[in-house]
Image (cartoon, rainbow, N blue to C red):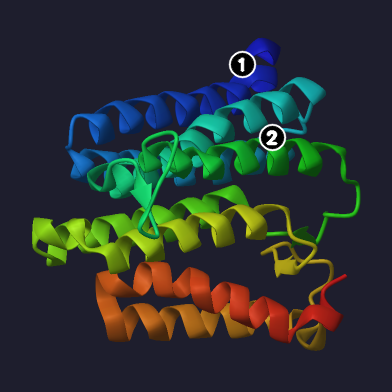
Amino acid sequence: MNFIKNNLANAITLGNLFSGCVGAVHLLLGDYKITTICIILSLVLDFFDGFVARALKSNSNLGVQLDSLADMVSFGFLPGLAMFKMLEPFGSEAFGMPFPFEIKYFGFLITLFSCLRLAIFNLDEEQKYYFKGLNTPSNTILIFGIYYFLKESSSPRIFDSALFETAFILLTILSSWLLVSPIKMIAMKFKSMKLQDNYPKLALLIGSILILALFKIVGIPLVIIYYIFISIVFQKQLK
């Protein structure tokens, strides 16, 4: 019984990793709808592994390391791969200039900075009730949400547009910077139950619900943009 209690959270974390691996394979195969299911499953498992560890009082350094390694695949490699797919049609030119490599590989800059962010997070003892920089699950929702929306609603030739090539490159740079930026981001962790201490969380929750109600699937990446915006608005209250 103790073995199950001590390792249940770790098993859930490994489930997150497995789901991320399956999602990456299906994204390469072009079946992005299966990838969507895998990302949702990884998000759920990523939430519940910590919840279960706290509930069973089975927190451990092993669990912390496993969580980051699983997130590196599900929320590090996968969004980089999604950007790789978005940049794939553009060959080896960007901004009208030849590059020494195919521009699609630039998408993995997101993966590199996700790895850096996870390593920083593991060493940073300040981020108990807020995040410093955009967390990797939110970044994955942003990048893959845009990819999913464009695949669902646009002509395939939209990915051949120079305008979209520039937009994807700039998004890659911005996303990578946000992951390691000093901007404080709201975390849904409650330091107290006082209403005034939780205004940022309430603003985030209510705003996100309204965005999703108004924009449906298009609202998914918009929620992350709103999350970044509302976090900047409440910078001084995040501590």
Q: Nearer the viewer, residue 69 or 78?
A: 78
Query: Which one is closest to the eye, mark 1 or mark 2?
Result: 2
Q: Which mark is residue 4?
A: 1
Relative to the observer, which residue lies in front, 45 or 137?
137
Quadrant containing the N terminus in the rendered view: top right
As drawn, 201 above or below 30: below
- Numbered disc 1: secondary structure: helix
Look at the picture and state if 56 lies above or below 215.
above
Q: Three-letter amino acid code at disc 1?
A: Ile
Mark 2 and mark 1 in contact (Cβ < 8 Å)? Answer: no
Which of pointers 1 and 2 lies earlier in the amino acid sequence? 1
Farthest right residue? Answer: 125
Q: Residues within 10 Å of mark 1 (few under 14, many from 20)?
A: few
Q: In the drawing, does residue 76 fall left or right of residue 40?
A: right
Image position, residue 48 (x, y; %): 56, 42
- Give percent across and percent down for residue 227: 57, 74
**Which disc, if any, is residue 53?**
2
Residue name at image x 51 percent, y 41 percent: 75
Q: Name the image quarter holding residue 173.
A: bottom right
Secondary-structure class at tag 2: helix
Percent from the top left, x then y, of residue 166? 39, 63
Q: Looking at the picture, how far across and down is residue 59, in whole percent? A: 77, 31
Residue plotted at (61% across, 23% down): 10
Quadrant in which the C terminus is drawn: bottom right
Question: Can you say whether 188 is above or below 93 in the image?
Answer: below
Query: Vertical placement of 161 versus 25: above or below?
Result: below
Name the residue furthest front. Answer: 97
Q: CA distance from mark 1 to mark 2?
A: 12 Å
Task: Name the kind of residue labelled 2 in the image.
Answer: Ala
